[in-house]
Amino acid sequence: MKTPLKYVLWFSFMLIFSQLSFAQTEPEMVFVKGGTFKMGNNQGDSDEKPEHTVTVSSFYISKFEITVKQYREFCTATGKQMPPKPNDEWYQEHDKAKAWEWKDANPMTFVTWDEAMAYIKWLNEKTGKNYDLPTEAQWEFAAGGGTLSKQYKYSGSENINEVAWFDETTYERGPMPIGRLKPNELGIYDMSGNAWEWCKDFYAPYKAGKFKNPVGPTKGQFRVIRGGSWYYVAWMSKITTRDGPYPDRANYNYGFRVVMNVSE
């Protein structure tokens, strides 16, 4: 028995529609040509030292932080609950914060390292691609402008107000929509400020030397976050600033972006 043509056409339309709908929320990626750079900062905090020479291969990185809209699609598809809104105690500690809303264009926050990896696993299954969290070296190379770097302190400028949402520009009220400020040399937005971004590596002291595509230690207690956030001071938004919370911890400052490696 033949299937009526109208049902075939309807099924084809719905399949194309679903693919197009998902494409609208799949991360927009920016190509980062590989190169060699000085990682770290001998004038920075102790965990930014020593500066060391790192070579990274070419890769793609998301133009923006993963948004609430993108993460909500993952939650809807998998049956996972969206993170909770802040409780009364949080508002007492953050007395300048406005009423929290999960707005589509804001960076997704209150995400643990494990939840970021779960999102990436789902995204890979959905797309057939090979997304991942950036290594710390990839993150710093991209934040610094890659091979187009002008050696700015912040990602895209010496003037933090041009490129970052931090405590003095958000007034500690909450994160801001992605892509509102100036991009860096590669056309990537918000790598300074707005949301701390999880990296793939375990957090550990730097070592002197020359390294190619470093991935950090093979084990550890903490995972790297980079970039500062809407609630933190300007110093924390420097390209070279590092921190390392427990991977199962989340707060309203922790978000992420993704990369795709290039086969060579």
Image: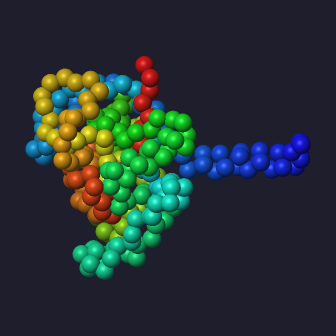
- Residue 92 coordinates in the image, percent (x, y): 26, 79
Image position of 3 (left or right of 50)? right
Q: Quadrant of the N terminus?
A: top right
Residue 28 lies, with reference to residue 245, above or below; the image says: above
Residue 207 lies, with reference to residue 24, above or below; the image says: above
Q: Residue at x 46, y 35 (%)?
A: 130
Q: Total of numbered circles in the picture?
A: 0
Instruction: State the residue lying farthest toward the top.
Output: 264
Q: Quadrant of the C terminus?
A: top left
Q: Quadrant of residue 252?
A: bottom left
- Residue 222 coordinates in the image, percent (x, y): 20, 48
Residue 95 showing in the rendered view: no
Q: Residue at x 37, y 41 (%)?
A: 133
Foreground: 60 or 42?
Answer: 60
Residue 91 lies, with reference to residue 46, above or below; the image says: below
Foreground: 238 or 93?
Answer: 93
Q: How is the image coloured?
A: rainbow
Image position of 152 (left or right of 19)? left
Q: Residue at x 44, y 49 (%)?
A: 119
Image position of 159 (left or right of 2)? left
Q: Residue at x 46, y 60 (%)?
A: 80
Q: Quadrant of residue 161?
A: bottom left
Instruction: State the residue lying farthest toward the left.
Output: 46
- Residue 8 coordinates in the image, percent (x, y): 83, 45
- Residue 235 coordinates in the image, percent (x, y): 21, 53
Residue 245 showing in the rendered view: yes
